[in-house]
């Protein structure tokens, strides 16, 4: 009888402790921040990959993907230059594919809806003739949270460290 009572008290204590831990985890700001960081990183990596992937055979889909991945000034630049860029890619008949090697969130301001990412990519450009050209690069992107989620609002090359002279 005593053993059953002790066992019941231990079970109730464990259930209470587990419930308290679950409550704390669900209401923990650091967990919320980590989720926002992960969401921004996933969206940033995908958007940077989209911006570096384009096939002349499916050009309209690729350019649509670029526009869907962006917002703000970057989006306006892409929309305004779409026809000229489409002509260049159609004439060159190139295929560019990008693979994300790694990425990191460099800053995150949830209240303002802004984030920064750095993404390392391997981009392969294949022309109609010749061998594919492979280039690895690091890009820095600014993200803005929109009603549709995180989107790129700026993208550029990451600066390379200074060399000792």
Image (tube, grey):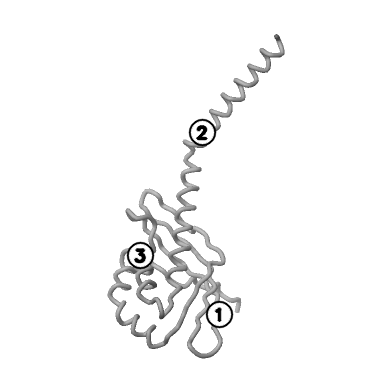
Report x, y in % for residue 82.
31, 77
Report x, y in % for residue 42.
48, 58
Q: Nearer the viewer, mark 1 or mark 2?
A: 1
* Between 81 and 65, the one nearer to me in the picture: 65
> What residue is at 56 percent from the left and 67 percent from the top?
101
Earlier in the chain: of badge 1 and badge 2, it is: 2
Q: State the residue position of label 3.
A: 68
Earlier in the chain: of badge 1 and badge 3, it is: 3
Which of the image's four quarters has the C terminus?
bottom right
Q: State the residue position of label 1.
A: 134
> What residue is at 47 percent from the left and 61 percent from the top?
117
Total label count? 3
Mark 1 vs 2: CB contact within 8 A: no
Q: Which mark is residue 106?
A: none
Measure how far apart labels 2 and 3 are at the Cα level: 37 Å
Label 1 sits on a secondary structure element that is strand
Label 3 sits on a secondary structure element that is helix
Q: How many other residues sit within 10 Å of disc 1, few (<14), some (14-19) or many (≥20)?
A: few
Q: Is residue 79 left or right of 155 when viewed as pictured?
A: left
Looking at this view, name the residue that lies furthest to the top: 1
Asked if 21 appears above or below 33 in the picture, the reply is above
Measure how far apart labels 1 and 2 are at the Cα level: 48 Å
Which of the image's four quarters has the N terminus?
top right
Which of the 4 image quarters holds residue 48?
Answer: bottom left
Q: How many other residues sit within 10 Å of disc 3, few (<14), some (14-19) or many (≥20)?
A: some
Report x, y in % for residue 77.
31, 73
* Between 86 and 43, the one nearer to me in the picture: 86
Q: State the residue position of label 2.
A: 24
Q: How many other residues sit within 10 Å of disc 2, few (<14), some (14-19) or many (≥20)?
A: few
Label 2 sits on a secondary structure element that is helix
Which of the 4 image quarters holds residue 61?
Answer: bottom left
């Amino acid at each position: 009888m005593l053993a059953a009572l002790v066992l019941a008290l231990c079970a109730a204590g464990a259930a209470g402790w587990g419930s308290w831990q679950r409550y704390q985890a669900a209401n923990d700001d650091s967990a919320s921040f980590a989720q926002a960081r992960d969401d921004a990183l996933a969206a940033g990596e995908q958007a940077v990959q989209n911006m570096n992937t384009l096939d002349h055979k499916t050009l309209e889909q690729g350019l649509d993907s670029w526009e869907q991945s962006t917002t703000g000034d970057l989006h306006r630049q892409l929309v305004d230059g779409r026809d000229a860029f489409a002509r260049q890619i159609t004439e060159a008949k190139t295929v560019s594919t990008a693979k994300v090697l790694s990425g990191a969130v460099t800053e995150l301001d949830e209240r303002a809806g802004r984030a920064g990412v750095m993404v390392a990519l391997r981009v392969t450009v294949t022309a109609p003739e010749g061998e594919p050209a492979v280039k690895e690069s690091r890009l820095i992107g600014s993200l803005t949270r929109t009603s549709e989620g995180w989107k790129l609002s700026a993208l550029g090359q990451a600066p390379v460290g200074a060399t000792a002279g």
